[in-house]
Image (cartoon, rainbow, N blue to C red):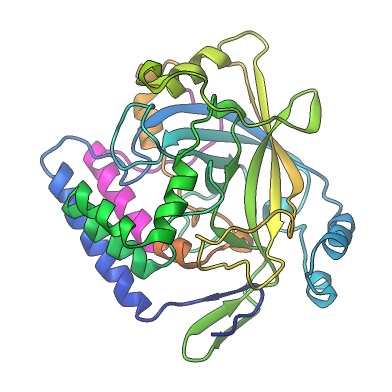
Amino acid sequence: MPTEMFTEYAEQNEKQLYEETCVVVKTEEEKIYGKAKRALRDTHAKSHAAVKAHIEIFDIDEDAIKQGLAERTKLPRTLIEGIKIRQGLFSSPGRHPVWLRFANGRPDVNPDSKSDTRAMSVKIINVEGDRLPECYQTNVQDIITQNGDVFFISSIADYLSFLKAAYKRPLFSLLWLIFHLRQFLALRGITGFAPKSLLTERYWSGSAYSLGLATRQGVCPDVPSVTYPAVVKYSFTPCMPEEPFLDVPREKIDLPESEIPENYYREDLIEKLARPGARYCWNFGIQFQTTDEMSIDNIIIPWPEVESPFFTVGRLTVEYQNIDFEKQLNFVEDLTFSPWNGLQAHRPVGALNRLRRHVYPLIAAYRLKKRGVQIDEMTGNENPN
C-alpha cells in the first residue's frame, strides 16, 4: 500500500483488535490482582523513584529549523513550508515544573540486573492550550519515553498476539519471539544496554506525535487514514549542565551482573541527587518524519538521525533533592501517565498510540480503584516525602 508523509493508517479490523486487547488485559489484571489490595501497572511495573524537575522551552527559531530541514533532509520544500513549530507546548518560551517517574519496562518487578528497558515518564505542568478529549488533567502534557528508539511490536495485531502468548506462560512468549525474528532482534536491541545511571541516559518517545491538527481524513485504498501538518518524535539527550548543547556519552554499568544490587537504579538516583549541588540535564529534541520509509505506524522501524536530525527545543533539568522512597511510594504509584493526556497540537499518532488510547485508561482505572485514589490536578509543588 502506498503511503503519504505525515499520515497514519488504520489496521484491518482495528476496532475489533482494541476490544479484544482490552478484554485480554482486563482478564489478566483481574487474574493477578483480583484478590490483592493493590495492582501494579501492566508494563513499567517497577518504580525507581519520582523525581522533581523543570523544563525550559526555548524561544524557538522556526526559520532556522526549517532551513536545517531543507539542508539536511530529503523533506520536500512544499511540506517544510507548511510546518508550524511554535504551537502547543512550543508556542512560547517559558519554564514549567515537571515530575519524572523512572521505572523498568517489564510487567513484573525484578532485580535491576535483569535485562530490560528503562523508562522515564515526563509530566510537564502548567501547559496551556486546547486539550485532547481523553485528558484527565487540565494543565499537563505527558510524554512517555524509554532508553530505546524503537518498540519491539510492529502492529496492533502483533501486540495482541504477543500478549496472548505472554499471558499463557513465559515459554509461550519466547516461542512467539522465535517465530517473529525481527521483533525478537528489536527486543534484544532495546533491552541489551544496562545504563550506568538513569540520570545520564538518553530516552526516546519511540512512537510519534502530530505537530498541529489533522488536515485531512481519507481512505487509502480501503483503510482509513489521517494526515497532519507534520509528525515528530521526541528525545531527551543527556547534556553537560555547564555546556547546554554538549551531549554526555552513554555508559554501561561497569559491574558483573552478579554484583548489581537488586535496586541499583533507585539507590543511584537517591545517592546522586542527595549530593550538594547535584544537577543533571537533558536536551529536549524533536525529530521530523522526513521520508515515507520512516514509518509512523510500524515503530519497530527506526528513524535514522543521519536522515532526520533532532532539533533542540528545550532543556529538562533535575537538581539536588532528597528522595525517601518509602515515604514517596504512594505518590509515585498514584502518578498516572498517558500520551493522550496533553494538547491537541501534539496528538499521539501511529498504531501503538492508538492502542494506548484504549488500554491505558482501563489499566489506570483498575489500578487506582484498587488503591482507593483518584487522579488529581498537578501544581509541581507536591511533596511526596
x and y percentages locating residue 44 in the rendered image: 38, 41
Left-right relation of 285 to 36: right
| Residue 19 occupies quadrant | bottom left
State the residue in front, 212 or 263. Answer: 263
Residue reaching furthest left?
Answer: 35
Q: Quadrant of the C terminus?
A: top left
Vertical order, 2 against 74 (above or below): below
Left-right relation of 118 to 250: left
Q: Is residue 231 magenta?
A: no
Q: Residue at position x 74%, y 60% from top?
A: 307
Vertical order, 125 against 239 (above or below): below
Vertical order, 211 against 241 (above or below): below
| Residue 370 occupies quadrant | top left
Q: Is residue 374 magenta?
A: yes
Residue reaching furthest bottom?
Answer: 221
State the residue in front, 200 or 260. Answer: 260
x and y percentages locating residue 314 in the rendered image: 73, 42
Left-right relation of 163 to 384: left
Label count reads 0
x and y percentages locating residue 263 in the rendered image: 38, 21
Left-right relation of 127 to 269: right
* One can see residue 356 in this view: no
State the residue in front, 52 or 270. Answer: 270
Q: Which residues are magenta?
A: 358-384
x and y percentages locating residue 8 in the rendered image: 55, 74
* One can see residue 274 in this view: yes
Q: Residue at position x 51%, y 67% from top?
A: 350
Q: Residue at position x 39%, y 43% from top?
A: 375
Vertical order, 112 against 157 (above or below): above
